[in-house]
Image (tube, rainbow, N blue to C red):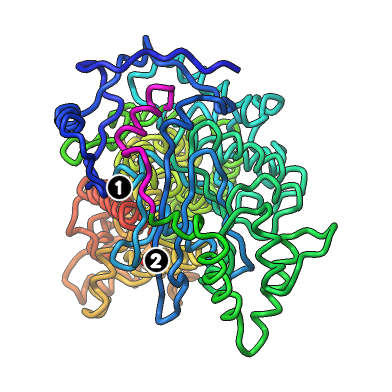
Amino acid sequence: MEAPNMSPLSAGDNPLLLIHHAPKTEQKTEAGKNNNRSARFKDPLTIRDLEDQHQVIDLSNASSPASTTHPFVLSFNNLSYGVNSKLLLDDISGVAREGEIMAILGASGAGKSTLIDALAGRIEKESLKGTVTLNGAVLESRLLKIISAYVMQDDLLFPMLTVEETLMFSAECRLPRCVSKKRKRERVEALIDQLGLRSAAKTFIGDEQHRGVSGGERRRVSIGIDIIHDPILLFLDEPTSGLDSTSAFKVVKVLGEIAKSGSVVIMSIHQPSYRIFSLLNRLIFLSHGQTVYSGTPATDFSLFFAEFGHPIPENENPCEFSLDLIRELEETPSGISSLVQFNKSWQMTRNPKMASDTDRQPDVDLEDAIEASISRGKLVSAGTNKNVQTFVNPFWTEMLFLSKRSNTNSRRMPELFGTRLGAQLVIACVLATLYWQLDDSPKGTRLRLAFVAFAMTTIFYNCAREIPALLQERNIFIRETSYNAYRVSSYVLAHALASIPSMITLSLVFALTTFWAVGLAGGFSGFLFFFITMFASYWAGTSFMAFVAGFIPNIQIGFTIVVAILGLSLLFCGFYISHDEIPSYWIWFHYVSLVKYPFQGALQNEYGDPNRCFLTGLQFFDGTPFDGLPNSTKIELLQSMSNVLGRNITGSTCLTTGMKILEQKGITDISKWKCIWILVAFGFLFRVLFYFTLLFGSKNKRR
C-alpha cells in the first residue's frame, strides 16, 4: 500500500499541533540550526486546513519512510515506586522504540501494570522516582494525554451501540474540529479494516443480556476507540486477558501493525503463547518489581538463560519456561536476587549496546519527530504551555454527542425504562385501588396522609434503579476523560438533560393513575401541582442517585447507602413523627429529608382550602370507644360538651379544617411552592456534587 500523499505544512492556517518546548538534553553545534529552530517554535506550529488537505492514513501502512527517518524513542531510567513501605518498582530502566512492541511480562504481582502506569503518566510525579522521556524531552502531563492512549484491561463500552457507532463517537470526540465529518468517517472505516472488524461493523457490542461481538472483537474495539486519533504512544494493560489463543494472536498482530505505522506500543502480558511471543520486539521480565531480563525475544533471550545455567529446551515455549523458572526462584530462600544480579552483569558484558540504550540520546528532537509524524498523516493535536488545546470540541458540541449516544443506547434497551415504568404503573394502580375515592372523614384524612407519604417515598426508591447504569457509565466516563475526550461539565449536564423525558413520563403516568382515583383535591390546578411535585421529586431523586454513583465502588454498597438514607428521610419527613415531636438533636435530619418537601407540598395542596371541613360533630367519635353508639346518643353527648365548653356543637358543626390538620403536622412553615423550589435546588446541589465527585474521583492516578 502506498503512503498517502500529504500536503506541506504552512503557517497561519488551522492549528493542529502545538508543541510544548521541552528542555533539550543535547545542544546542536550549528548556530544556524539553533536560530532556525528558535524562529520556527516562537509561535505554535500550524498545518493546513484538514478539511481540505488532510489525508486519513491507514494504520497498516508500515513502509512510510518517515518512520525510520524520524523515530520516536521512549526512554525510562531508574524508575522506583512504592506504597506503604512496599517497593512495587525497583530501579527499572529501558527503551521502547517506534515500530516495535515492547512487552512487559511477569507473574501476577510482578509489577507489570504498575510499570505501564508509570510510563503512561498515571502515577503522581511526587510518588514516582526516576525519569521518563520521549526523544530526550520530559513530557508535560497535558501533552502526554493528547499524544498517547491507554487501553485498560476491561472492555468498557456501551452495549447497544454498534462497532461502527462506537468508533465514530470516539472520532467525534478525539479528532480536531477542522477534520470534516467525511474525513472522520473515512478514518473510522480505515480503522475498522485495520482492526479486522469489517464483518462486525454493524453488530452491537452486546453484554450479558444482549448478544453481540466476540471477546476478541470487543478487545479490538476497545483498542480502536483509543487509537482513533493515531497516538504516538500506545499503552495497553493486559490486552489479551480473557481471550482464546486465536483472538489473542489477532490482537497482538494488530498491535504490531499499529507500531509499524509510526507508534510506540508498550503492553503488559501475563503468559503469551509461542505465536504471540514471536511477534514481540522487546521484552522486560519483572519479578517483585525488579528486572530479571531486558532485551530482545530472539537470540538474546535463549542465550541469556543458557548462560545463567538454565538453557531453554527445544520445542518448549520460551516464555512459559522462563516464567516457571522465575516462580521456582521466587520460592527459594535467596529469591530472585541471583537472576537480577546476573541480568545486570550480563547486560554490561555480553550486550553493552542494550545496556547503554537508555543513556543514548535519540537522533531526532521531539519537535522534529512530531512534525514529521504530522506531515505523513498522523492525527495528533497537542499544545504549548500557554496555548493548550485541551479539548478538540466546544462544550455544546460535546453535550450533543454525549446526549445522542446516551439516548441511542437507552432507546435500544427499552426493557430498562420499561421495567421502571411498569413498576411505577403497578404501584400507582395498587395505590389507586387501595385508597379509592377517599372522603373528608377522619379516616379519609388518615389514609390521605399515608398515601402521600408512601407515594413520595416510592418515587425516590424507583430512582434507585438507575444506580447500576450510572456505575457502568462512570467507568466508561473515567476511561474517556482520562485523555480529555470531553469535559466533566458537559457530561454532567448532558446526563441531566437526557434524563428529563423519562422523568416527565414517569411523573405523568403516576399522577394520571392516582390523582382522580384517590379523590385528591384541587381539580386540574391541583392535578398540575401534584404532577409538578412528582417531577421535582424525580429530579431531586435522580440527582441524588447520580451523586451516590459518583463515589461508591459497587452496586451493593450503593443500594445499602440509598436504602438507609431514604428510610431515614421517610422517618423524619413528618408523617410518623411531627416537627414539634422530633428531638432537637435530630431536627436537622427533618430539614435535609428528601421526602419532607414533596410530602409537605402535596399535603398543602390537599388541605390548603380554609373552607373545607375534615371533622364534624358526629365524626368526632370516629375511631373512639363511642364510635358504635347511635347518632342520637352522640348528639346528646355533644350537647353535654356544649354546656361544659360554652360553645354550641351540633352534629354538623365543623371542628377541624385543613389548616388545622397542617398545623397539627407542623407543616405550615413553608409554602407548597417553596417546597417545589427546595426540591429543585436539592437536585442542582446533587448535580454539582456529582460534578465534583467525577472531577476529583476520575484522576485515575496512583499516589
Q: Which residues are magenta?
A: 360-378
Give the residue pinned by disc 2. 78
**Between 359 and 182, which is closer to the camera in this rendering?**
359
Disc 1 to disc 2, C-alpha distance: 16 Å
Q: Does the stretch in magenta take in 372?
A: yes
Q: Residues within 10 Å of mark 1 (few under 14, many from 20)?
A: many
Q: Residue furthest bottom?
A: 333
How many marks do you count on the picture? 2
Q: Residue at the spot x=68%, y=52% of the render?
A: 298
Q: Residues within 10 Å of mark 2 (few under 14, many from 20)?
A: some
Residue 349 versus residue 54 in the image, above or below: below
* Secondary structure of residue under mark 2: strand
* Quadrant of the image containing the C terminus: bottom left
Q: Residue at the spot x=55%, y=50% of the render?
A: 102
Q: Amino acid at mark 1?
A: Ala
Mark number for residue 137?
Answer: 1
Q: Residue furthest right?
A: 315
Q: Position of residue 662 (x, y in %)?
A: 26, 59
**Direction from residue 165 to residue 666 in the image, left or right:** left
**Direction from residue 267 to residue 502 in the image, left or right:** left
The answer to which image quadrant residue 670 occupies is bottom left
Residue 43 versus residue 537 in the image, above or below: above
Residue 445 in view: no
The answer to which image quadrant residue 336 occupies is bottom right
Residue 82 in view: yes
Q: Position of residue 644 (x, y in %)?
A: 21, 77
Q: Amino acid at mark 2?
A: Asn
**Between 285 and 663, which is closer to the camera in this rendering?**
285
* Quadrant of the image containing the N terminus: top right
Q: Does the stretch in magenta take in 63?
A: no
Q: Residue at the spot x=57%, y=57% of the render?
A: 295
**Direction from residue 421 to residue 325 in the image, left or right:** right
